[in-house]
Amino acid sequence: MGARAVAREAATPADDGRTSVADFDVLVLGAGSGGYACALRAAQLGLSVGLVERDRVGGTCLHVGCIPTKALLHAAEVADSAREADKVGVLARLDGVDMAGVNAYKDGVVSRLFKGLTGLVRSRGITVIEGEGRMTGPTSVTVGDRTVTGEHLVLASGSYSRTLPGVEVDGERVLTSEHALSLDRVPASVVVLGGGVIGCEFASVWRSFGAEVTILEALPRLVPSEDEACSKALERAFRKRGIGFHTGTRVEGVTATDDGVAVTVEGGGVHEAELLLVAVGRGPHTDGLGYAEQGIELDRGFVVTDERLRTSVPHVYAVGDIVPGLQLAHRGFQQGLFVAEQIAGLDPRPIDESAIPRVTYSHPEVASVGLTEEQARAQHGDAVATVTYDLGGNGKSQILGTQGFVKLVSLVDGPVLGCHLVGDRVGELIGEAQLIYGWEAHADDVAPLVHAHPTQNEALGEAHLALAGKPLHAHS
Ligand code: NAD
């Protein structure tokens, strides 16, 4: 335990008049994206910070989420490039995928980032308290036999992989994404339960590595929360890649077979494979942490907050996946920064949830910000205009051999309300789309901006030219 041994001597008057001696100005429970971002910013602002973590600083994103998954996806891209090298006249071939080597590469990326992060936390003077923390007072957390107190407490306990009744995860044949990340082989065949973000990313990786993949998705389309055009384009691309999928198909249960699993779906169909990946969403990790006992209002396990991320208990905030909304690391970072600044009295602007970018890093990628066409039409009716610019007209996309589009959703003579992209590497373009959305730009504001040629980024510029009524490399 590295907790600071001596409590601050001076009593700090809190803004509600209470007087207390707290170990820290800010005590953070959970050192994932939301928690560590809050800790780093609070320390930067001169506050003393305690950070309670039962596992490793960095949380799901760094150790068993975003970073290792994207490393696998990069290895998958390299495999595809080798397999298709002859298309560009390069004599190379894919002899196979050595999972030990892939995992060593992936783990190397994670451990370098982990080392950097722990160094950063140390250099900012943050006290990391190792162990399972439990809220045992209005702003206190007990770790083992020690109780630490903060003037303010930030709950950042993250999320876990959910499963379904009738689908028991054993880590051998029925896996969550965490198990899938440390698999020591390329499976011959996989059924993926859920065609959301995790399902599509792993389906993409395994297919690139040579597995037979079938996705089962209950809703009518893959990545169902994205604009329908993106789902259709991803489905087309997956079909071409030989990734099987059944939409409108609800999984009911799974049983073991001699050499794998048999997955039953509503209506009686059965899908057999070596492995089943369960990717039906992530639940908030709030059970058994003393939240309810301390009066924190919960809704189906999520912590209820106001727009300033305050919980129902004074001086207690919540950030990250336990707060209802998009469960994304970058949302957690921003919430963490926000809460730290709020505690420090900087009066930060509440986060606009609709401006949070979303990326599915499959091959091809799907990236979006703002409203889908359906959502925009529901809110604004006929006042909505859309433009779709096909990557077929984009030089760099042709060079890379990727297909897809940029779709803009806008108010007629008004701001851009949504931007939806499909294609390899388009996740890297979402930053500009996000600025356009966030600054409520009109097509006419973007059209005069010069985009470097030849880049995929140009496709965003071309789409705005088209929306402004003056398409260049597209038909009017
Ligand atoms: P998700 O909610 O994106 O997708 C789960 C899918 O499972 C849904 O489409 C749902 O309809 C389907 N489903 C549920 N029950 C089913 C059933 N009985 N039969 C068939 N299908 C069923 O969740 P996820 O993909 O597990 O991801 C979890 C969270 O992690 C998400 O919030 C996601 O945004 C986040 N995440 C993000 C990224 C990224 O940003 N690239 C990557 C991984 C995870």
Image (cartoon, rainbow, N blue to C red):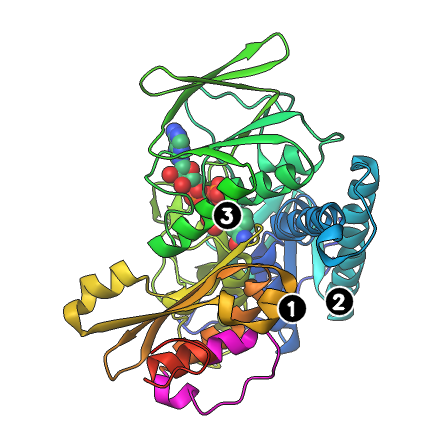
Q: In this rendering, is residue 159 above or below 185?
A: below
| Mark 2 close to ligand 1, CB under 8 Å | no
Numbered label attached to residue 120: 2
Instruction: Identify the residue at horizontal 54%, vertical 56% (top origin).
Output: 365
> Are there few (<14), some (14-19), or many (20+) residues within 10 Å of tag 2?
few
Residues at marks 1 and 2 touching, judged by CB atoms closer than 8 Å: yes
**Image coordinates for residue 9, horizontal then vertical, percent:** 66, 69
Which residue is tagged 3? 237
Instruction: Identify the residue at horizontal 26%, vertical 73% (top origin).
Output: 385
| Mark 1 close to ligand 1, CB under 8 Å | no
Describe the element under mark 1 as helix, strand or loop: helix
Residue 265 figure quarter = top left
Decide which of 55, 464 is in the foreground and name it. Answer: 464
Which badge, 3 or 1, is on the more N-terminal residue? 1
Asked whether residue 284 is in view, the answer is: no
On screen, residue 150 versus residue 17, left or right, reads right
Instruction: Identify the residue at horizontal 35%, vertical 15% (top origin).
Output: 268
Which badge, 3 or 2, is on the more N-terminal residue? 2
Residues at marks 3 and 2 touching, judged by CB atoms closer than 8 Å: no
Which badge, 1 or 2, is on the more N-terminal residue? 1
> Are there few (<14), some (14-19), or many (20+) residues within 10 Å of tag 1?
many
Decide which of 433, 119 is in the foreground and name it. Answer: 433
Describe the element under mark 3 as helix, strand or loop: helix
Q: In this rendering, is residue 323 above or below 173?
A: below
Q: Quadrant of ligand 1?
A: top left
**What's the residue type where badge 3 is placed?**
Ala
Q: Which residues are magenta?
A: 441-461
On screen, residue 385 versus residue 387, left or right, reads left
